[in-house]
């Protein structure tokens, strides 16, 4: 069968044959091509300015949090330990995508190694799920602090906080681990172009020229199970917390406590709403591609606890 080349605008050529789609010994492509933000290529340099600004704020803000919690003994409390974990996840998520995005925007360096692409995919998914787990832990901490303040130090000891933190990290690592292994086993014989600025899991597996239902069902099941459980427990925690706040006899204390709780709720909404929007639009595609990609970038670059 005659070989058909697929030519890219930047001069990369990935030849393939139609018979490769059914071949059991198909070799995965050496590289993928990231397009950046499709449709907005002319504005890439300008878009890089707010991206760099957000990254600078992320670096400065999160390292300030880590430094203050480390040096100030009065901040050695469960809430601030969880806040430090949240700061680390912000740093990892933004650092895992921005350098490559800037290399695309500034130097047109669109190629990414296949293994590096899967590694980036794993880190993004893993730390998103870790971030979700940390928010649940922070919600539980708020619940104990407001509903049972006298036993807060007894319930949330340093040992308990360490175990909860380790469980959150291991949960994300284990549940996300199958994603890159599933993505690696699919044959990619149509194209190696990813219409995205980073290796988004759905965008990558959609390039496979085989039935990817196993990957799709697993991805959906994990998202519904993990995020669904996190949202459920967070909702229960804050429902009980708000009930306790409204029972407080002094209105000023109510307002002060509600202000603290309200800031936590804003953080949670800032995390879950863009995540849900990005996941649904990427999966079902009813929004313009450049808007989906922009939203996905903003969601990872904007620190959720600022």
Image (cartoon, rainbow, N blue to C red):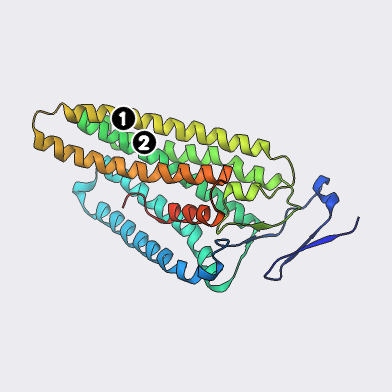
Q: Nearer the viewer, residue 237 or 114?
A: 237
On the image, the x and y values in percent for residue 292 come to 52, 52
On the image, the x and y values in percent for residue 285 come to 57, 46
Residue located 90% across and 58% down the image:
2
Residue located 71% across and 45% down the image:
185
Q: Nearer the viewer, residue 258 or 173?
A: 258
On the image, the x and y values in percent for residue 147 come to 21, 28
Identify the image quadrant of the N terminus. Answer: bottom right
Residue 82 - label: none
Residue located 44% across and 42% down the image:
130
Residue 235 visible within the image: yes
Against 175, residue 190 (above or below) is below
Residue 136 - label: 2
Residue located 41% across and 38% down the image:
133
> How many discs appear?
2
Residue 151 visible within the image: no
Residue 237 - label: 1
Is label 2 in contact with label 1 (beta carbons under 8 Å)? yes
**Mark 2 or mark 1: which comes first in sequence?**
2
Left or right of residue 194, residue 3 in this image = right
Against 10, residue 174 (above or below) is above
Local SS, label 2: helix
On the image, the x and y values in percent for residue 193 come to 66, 58
């Amino acid at each position: 069968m005659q070989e058909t080349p697929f030519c890219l605008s930047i001069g990369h050529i990935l030849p393939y044959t139609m018979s490769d789609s059914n071949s059991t010994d198909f070799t995965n492509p050496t590289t993928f091509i990231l397009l950046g933000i499709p449709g907005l290529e002319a504005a890439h340099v300008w878009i890089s300015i707010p991206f760099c600004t957000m990254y600078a704020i992320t670096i400065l803000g999160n390292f300030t949090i880590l430094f203050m919690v480390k040096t100030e003994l009065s901040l050695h409390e469960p809430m601030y330990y969880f806040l430090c974990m949240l700061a680390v996840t912000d740093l990892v998520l933004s650092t895992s995508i921005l350098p490559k995005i800037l290399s695309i925007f500034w130097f047109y360096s669109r190629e990414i190694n296949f293994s590096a692409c899967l590694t980036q995919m794993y880190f993004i998914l893993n730390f998103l799920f870790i971030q979700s787990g940390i928010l649940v832990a922070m919600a539980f901490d708020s619940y104990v602090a407001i509903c049972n303040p006298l036993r807060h130090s007894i319930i949330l000891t340093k040992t308990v906080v360490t175990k909860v933190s380790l469980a959150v990290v291991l949960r994300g690592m284990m549940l996300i681990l199958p994603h890159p292994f599933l993505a690696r086993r699919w044959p990619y014989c149509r194209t190696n172009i990813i219409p995205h600025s980073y290796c988004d899991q759905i965008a990558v597996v959609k390039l496979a020229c085989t039935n990817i239902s196993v990957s799709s069902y697993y991805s959906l099941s994990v998202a519904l199970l993990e995020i669904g459980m996190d949202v459920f427990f967070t909702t229960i925690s804050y429902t009980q917390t708000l009930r306790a706040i409204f029972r407080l006899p002094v209105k000023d204390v109510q307002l002060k406590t509600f202000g603290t709780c309200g800031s936590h709720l804003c953080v949670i909404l800032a995390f879950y709403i863009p995540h849900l929007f990005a996941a649904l639009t990427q999966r079902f595609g009813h929004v313009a591609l450049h808007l989906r990609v922009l939203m996905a970038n903003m969601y990872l670059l904007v620190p959720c606890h600022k």
